Image (cartoon, rainbow, N blue to C red):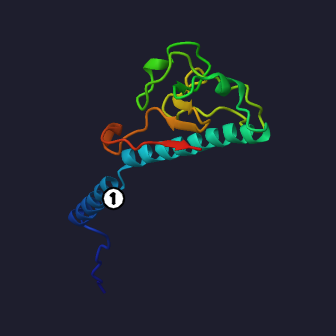
Amino acid sequence: MHRSRKLLGFTMVELIIVIAIIAILAAVIFVAVDPARRLHEARNARRSSDVQTILDAVVKYQVDNDGAHYSTVATATAGSYYVIGTAGSGCDTTCGAQTTQAACLNLSALPANYLSAVPTDPNGGTAANTDYYISRSATNNITVGACDPEGEDAGGTGTAPTIEVSR
């Protein structure tokens, strides 16, 4: 009584073909997802949120104080742009979106019920230079924006969106 035994399993060629197909599918999905672009979009979304947060805090302060602006905003030259931060100088060379004054405009002492911490740019902002700017118009409208939004192309190049809000 002799039974023939068949070996069960995959051949080497079948395994190589399956691995190649999985590798091709992974490469196609990776290119389609474009993680670098998603990172740029995520940082720009955070910039938009931060800009709105800063503007809301400054406007709420103004509303709660019978139309008077926060002290550093009130003393800023109307129509001029200032980088938000604690640095006393050098703020005029860092903002790509607007021509700004040399001294930063300090919002760090704004009461915590308006702004618990001044937001910083997700790509290198610091307390000394947040990489966000602010301006007060002659009619007391406030504009807040991001100095260096990233483009949608590889490496953050390409046309960058304008991230700015006014009220």
Residue 8 image position (x, y, % from top left): 32, 73
Vertical arrangement, residue 163 with respect to residue 120, above or below: below
Q: Given the image, on which type of amino acid does mark 1 rest? A: Ile
Frontmost residue, 157 versus 34: 157
The image shows residue 129 at horizontal and vertical percentages of 55, 23
| Residue at the extreme top | 89
Q: Foreground residue, 9 or 81?
A: 81
Q: Give the quarter of the figure containing the N terminus.
A: bottom left
**In percent of the image, x 28 and y 58: which residue is there?**
28
Q: Work out which residue is located at the far front of the displayed protein and give it.
A: 139
Q: Is residue 43 visible?
A: yes
Side of 12 where 58 appears, left or right: right
**Residue 149 occupies quadrant:** top left
Q: Give the residue at mark 1.
A: 29
Crowdedness of circle 1 by 10 Å Cα count: few (<14), some, many (20+)? few
Asked whether 7 or 74 is in front, the reply is: 74
Q: Residue at x 37, y 44 (%)?
A: 36
Residue 107 appears in the figure: no
Element marked by disc 1: helix
- Quadrant, the C terminus: top right
Q: Is residue 135 left or right of residue 16?
A: right
Report the front residue among 33 and 119.
Answer: 119
Q: Position of residue 125 (x, y in %)?
A: 53, 28
Residue visible at 36% across and 55% down in the picture: 33
In x, y percent, where is residue 121?
A: 53, 33
